[in-house]
Image (cartoon, grey):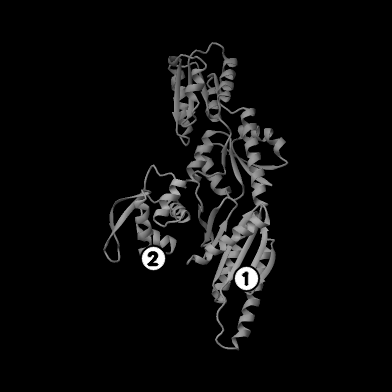
Amino acid sequence: MYHIGVVGPEQSVERILDVAQEFEKELRFHPFTYQKAVETKKIVMEHKNQVDAWLFSGPIPYSIAKGVLGDDQSLHGVLFLETGLYKSFLNLLLQNRNLTKLSVDLPEGANISDEALSQLEVQESNLEIKTFQPDIDEDDIYQYHYKLWKNGKTDGVLTCYPSVQDRLAEHGIPVSWITTTRLETKQTLLSLSEKAKAHYYQNTQVAVCFIETEHPELEKEELLYNMQWTELKMDEILLRASRSMNGSFHKTGSGDYMIFSSRGEVYEHLNNLHIAIEKIQSDLNRPIAAGIGFGDSVLKAEFNARKAVQRSKSSKHEKIILIDEHGVVEEYRHEQLNVSYISESTEPELVKKLGEYHISVQLFNKIKSYIERKNWNTFTSRDIALELGMSNRNSQRILQGLRKAGLIVEIGETKSHDKGRPMKLYCFKQENSHK
């Protein structure tokens, strides 16, 4: 079941849950209401591990959550379209048909105010529009509308805050709360429903795990017993890891193993496999290469797993390599997925440029991914060498190649702390959008 946290003021959450009843067979909803929009920060931080996605009642809580969690794909806001504004305007006219001057508050980034209000053909002189940051103090919004009305500059109010509506209504001020409509809510839920189906499909994909160990050479005949004992211990450790992933365990050779499971089980229990591999490496002193492949068939998953294990072999880091059906590579290290990148490119010009300097597309995308994950505006050959586990000399060669290919630029020098020798400082070109 796909779990969705619904966040908003109580009235909005109740409206969303009412519309959501027809989606309860495939989606499970968890309501989180607040008195003030700024409480969204606490809600998403405390409950982010309990849901697969968030649904916010409007642009205000959505923007606040985005400020906390960043551009997270699990964040969704109910569509804030013109119809919601028109509905609120109609409700206001039904209260008082003699309204000629209005004050309106809208969150920054809503992108509907100019176009929507212009279609009403209301003179600009009759409108007072205030845009605001999502985490503004709601009392500031109240004071803004109240002062305009008290000074005779407005006859009514359209506000995005239900608490502001209640306070203004106490003074007898015609006011309407700008809310989303049932249609807008249903459209958003349909989108979430499709995402839930895609999530289910992805989690049920076939996953094949390859684990290969290096075979030490026997120097003395009596070491044969030790080798057999070691393999039995490895069998036990990996069998337990396989069981935790609800997988099918197969020994394909001396020290080589395959585990068949599903993508969802692998991601959920990936750390168990990581712990098992670390235990074999530390307790039994056997170097291990581990690769995981995903696909919508066993054949495709196995093919990706073989590519993944080869990359794990060539890496000096202790990490598990994962490759999905789209060629996206992920590296699991230090108990977390550290980086993901595309191993191929559909841009012939980029491939040609990289080929001229003997740099693979995979390596280029990997470097970009590390730099984006670290939020580096600039970097040195030493930075790249440490992240990718290569020599500084090799890193220098690669960066020089990328510079000559016109993909990065040299912008200055820095100094190394240990030797005091200047190091060249690079950054990616702003117009470079290759992935």
Question: What residue is shown with label 1?
Answer: 256
Tally the numbered discs.
2
Q: Is residue 405 left or right of residue 337?
A: left
Q: Is residue 304 above or below residue 249?
A: above
Q: Can residue 265 be seen?
A: no
Q: Which amino acid does label 2 sit on?
A: Ser
Depth check: 23 or 195 in front?
A: 195
Residue 92 place in picture, x, y as percent: 57, 18
Residue nearest the observer in this picture, 41 or 226: 226
Left or right: 106 as drawn, with respect to 380? right
Residue 279 vertical placement versus 378 (above, below): below
Image location of residue 326, percent across then percent down: 57, 50
As measured in the structure, the alpha-carbon distance from the residue carrying label 2 to the one carrying label 1 is 30 Å
Measuring from the top left, give residue 12's x and y in whole percent: 61, 32
Q: Which element type, helix, strand or loop, lies under badge 1? A: strand
Residue occupying the point 51% across, 43% down: 41
Residue at the location (52% across, 67% down)? 313
Q: Quadrant of residue 247?
A: bottom right
Residue 355 in percent (x, y) is at 43, 54
- Specify which label sits upstream in the sequence, 2 or 1: 1
Q: Mark 2 points at which residue?
A: 391
